[in-house]
Amino acid sequence: MTHLKRDLEDALGEEIKKHEIQMRVTPEGLVVSLSEIGFFDSGDATLLPGGRSTLARIASILNEKGFQIRIEGHTDNVPIHTARFKSNWDLSTARATEVVSLLVEKHGFDPEQISAAGYSQYHPVADNDSAEGRQANRRVDLIIVARTQRVETPTTVKPLGN
């Protein structure tokens, strides 16, 4: 994970300086947080053009290394209710799904490598009592868990007991 973190830091230096991306190592693996700023308009789940470009750089590094990746959408605790999203659950899940769709359909990731989840406001990284804290909580996390282990699927299955 140390080499992967270094590769990503080299590729994403500008976004890290602008606080559009944060990275941290946890017991689960490397977490790459894509802030709402730079990636999504407020209250929307469509990745911005600049965010698509950044995601392409991330994808080029991650896809070649064959990691399992969880994509998690997060929001702050300010309730949302729009024509498209009736709740923070909907928005956080839609953002995670948008990233998964792009990784699979545009960047060739194996769908077995990736999962998506929406956590709404329930996994904050900062206090929601300040504007800065709420901003930090509006993010999509890519959790790089482990290298994918390919398991050969048998072409024929023999019944047990024979």
Image: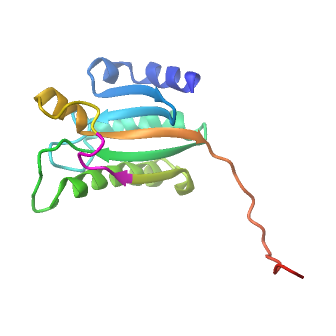
Number of numbered discs visible in the structure rendering: 0
Principal secondary structure, stretch drawn in magenta = loop
Q: Position of residue 39 (x, y in %)?
A: 26, 38
Say which quarter of the image contains residue 161: bottom right
Q: Which residue is drawn at 46% across and 19% down?
A: 10
Q: Was residue 124 drawn as part of the magenta stretch in this picture?
A: no
Q: In which quarter of the image is the C terminus?
A: bottom right
Does residue 27 appear left or right of residue 97 in this picture? right
Task: Judge whether 11 appears above or below 96 on screen.
Answer: above
Task: Judge whether 72 appears above or below 65 on screen.
Answer: below
Q: Which residue is drawn at 44% across and 50% down?
A: 106
Q: As rendered, which of 85 and 75 lies closer to the eye?
A: 75
Q: Where is residue 8 in the image (x, y as percent from the top left)?
A: 47, 25
Task: Judge whether 149 appears above or below 154 on screen.
Answer: above
Highlighted range, magenta? 117-123
Q: Which residue is drawn at 59% across and 40% down?
A: 146
Task: Judge whether 142 appears above or below 111 on screen.
Answer: above
Extreme residue toward the right, this view = 162
Say which quarter of the image contains residue 133: top left
Q: Position of residue 159 (x, y in %)?
A: 81, 81
Does residue 158 appear left or right of residue 116 in this picture? right
Q: Quadrant of the N terminus?
A: top right
Say which quarter of the image contains residue 56: top left
Q: Where is residue 60 in the image (x, y as percent from the top left)?
A: 50, 36
What colour scheme has been applied to the protein in the rendered image?
Answer: rainbow
Q: As rendered, which of 150 and 57 lies closer to the eye?
A: 150
Q: Which residue is drawn at 46% across and 46% down?
A: 70
